[in-house]
Amino acid sequence: MEEKELLLETCVLAGKIMVENGAEMYRVEDTMNRIADNYYQEEGISFVTQTIVLMGLESTKSIQMKRISERTTNLGKVSKVNDLSWQFSSKQIDLQELSKALKVVLKEEPPKKTVVKIICAAILSAALMILLGGQWNNFFATFLVGAGGYSVYMISTTYLKLKYVDEFLASFVIGVLAFLMIQLKIGTSIDNMIIGSIMPLVPGVAITNTVRDLQEGHMLSGISRGVEALIIAMMIGAGIAVAFNAMS
């Protein structure tokens, strides 16, 4: 493989990893262009959206493209790509080593410790309930509601794999469980329990990236991220509303 073809492939691979794992579009383009610039000052021409990564060089007519079919939030992988690009720019590794290292990062599977994730989500739900003005007598109830809701979310994302339906089902279960906690007199405030329990489902990273992309002038990706975050928020609200109607 010619060196410039390898450079293009490496740049696009870095961009693909970053987009798939929740990086901002301007950061993706900056990383790709910096990799090209540090390879004998090649001037890169990049175009990135949520579904496609394109990269070309001024010195050649060749273009590399990769399609993004799945996206998640794994800032650990984004950090690894940033670290590798910095090592490349400081001449600690060469282009071949960078390409091999990125392929390793791409194939890395996130830890599948479902129980740990559910426990963490439950603790987060209960802690945020307190931070948002809730009372300590709702802590244990919110812990249980958050654990139940996130368990349904994990099951849905694993087996159903229907985007946006996952959040709807999880929020519906959260609403039902919150009602049950009131009926069983384990909790006292249904509002506080629901507010705390839906926090692990809220697309906070997507909303933050929307604002940052819009500030950097990436209107297409910023608006598309914003619409996606809005749909998720609407599905969460719809799940709670359906639960209220079903239990009232």
Image (tube, helix red, strand yellow):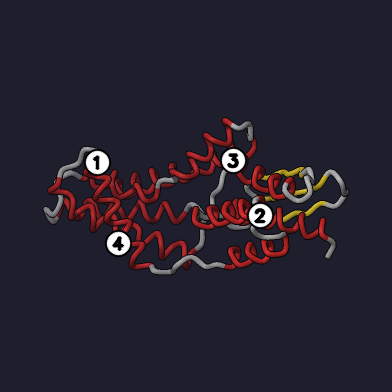
Q: Secondary structure at mark 4?
A: helix
The reply to whether the C-beta atoms of the residues labelled 1 and 4 are less than 8 Å apart is no
**Relative to 225, residue 158 above or below:** below
Q: Amino acid at mark 4?
A: Ile
Distance in Å between CA atoms under marks 2 and 3: 32 Å
From the image, tell me which residue sits under label 1.
131
- Tell me the residue at 20%/55% (across/down): 180
Q: Quadrant of residue 43?
A: top right
Distance in Å between CA atoms under marks 1 and 4: 18 Å
From the image, tell me which residue sits under label 2.
88
Q: Quadrant of the N terminus?
A: bottom right
Q: Nearer the viewer, mark 2 or mark 4?
A: 2
* Residue nearer the viewer, 230 or 114: 114
Q: Secondary structure at mark 1?
A: helix
From the image, tell me which residue sits under label 4.
119
Q: Amino acid at mark 2?
A: Phe
Q: Earlier in the sequence, mark 2 or mark 1?
A: 2
Q: Earlier in the sequence, mark 2 or mark 3?
A: 2
Q: Position of residue 17 (x, y in %)?
A: 61, 56
Q: Earlier in the sequence, mark 2 or mark 4?
A: 2
From the image, tell me which residue sits under label 3.
224
Q: Is residue 159 left or right of residue 101?
A: left
Q: Earlier in the sequence, mark 4 or mark 3?
A: 4
| Tag count | 4
Q: Amino acid at mark 3?
A: Ser
Q: Residues within 10 Å of mark 2 (few under 14, many from 20)?
A: some
